[in-house]
Image (spheres, grey):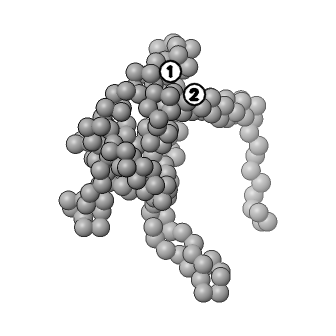
Amino acid sequence: MPGSEPHPSLDAAELGAYFALIEVGNLVRHAVEQQLRDAGDLSYVQFQLLATLGDAPGGSRRMTELADGVVISRSGLTYQVGLLERDGLVVRGQAADDDRGVTVTLTGAGRGKLGAVFPGHVALLRELVFDAIGPRDVEDLGRVLGVVRDHLRTVPPRSVTARRRRGPAGDRTVTQRR
């Protein structure tokens, strides 16, 4: 950008850590996605949604909480929840405290699907990640990634940020809250 200060480049250690993080994330996600498809015909996002609901009190969460927690757009969430609902794994309902709010609740079939995929999921994570490092490294990895995650979470969730909309002349000057 003209007039902005140049950013210093990453040093060799930072660049190595960044590339390792990206590669590990890609390798683990690819293997996990395959395991979820084979064991339960689930996508990675669908598994995240079911697991999040399985961990929630009463097996329910508001749609906006799910979108922000799983880091997915509202339209993407609506589509994925629709697929899960079609398969009888979740149900949608009106939020008790807000007429405009929608909750998603895990069904018995959804809990059964989680039960079917979890053993293989856990075994795969042990094989790919945790067996390769010692218990102390697991604690360090959790601590470091937790700090980075918490820092990234200080940015407002996408669902509450203003987005640019096209005005009548086609310009992008009008903003709307999501």
The vertical placement of 107 against 169, above or below, is above
| Residue at image coords 37%, 37% | 51
Left or right, 108 with reference to 134: left
**Residue at the extreme left of the image, as rendered:** 96
Task: Check disc 2: other Cα within 10 Å, few if <14, some if 14-19, many if 20+.
Answer: some
Residue 60 in the image: x percent, y percent? Answer: 27, 47
User: SS for tag 1?
Assistant: helix
Residue 92 in the image: x percent, y percent? Answer: 30, 54
| Amino acid type at mark 1 | Leu
Instruction: Name which quarter of the figure residue 128 lies in.
Output: top right
Residue 151 in the image: x percent, y percent? Answer: 50, 44
The vertical placement of 68 against 106, above or below, is below
Give the spatial CA distance, label 2 vs label 1.
Answer: 8 Å
**Along the line of sight, which residue is nearer the eye, 171 or 124?**
124
Q: In which quadrant is the C terminus drawn? A: bottom left
To which residue does mark 2 refer?
Answer: 31
Mark 2 / mark 1, whichever is N-terminal: 2
| Amino acid type at mark 2 | Ala
**Along the line of sight, which residue is nearer the eye, 24 or 59?**
59
To which residue does mark 1 refer?
Answer: 124
Q: In which quadrant is the N terminus drawn? A: bottom right
The answer to whether the residue labelled 2 contacts the one labelled 1, judged by CB atoms less than 8 Å apart, is yes
**Residue at the extreme front of the image, as rendered:** 87
Mark carried by residue 57: none
Left or right, 82 with reference to 37: left
| Residue at image coords 36%, 32% | 114
Residue 42 in the image: x percent, y percent? Answer: 46, 37
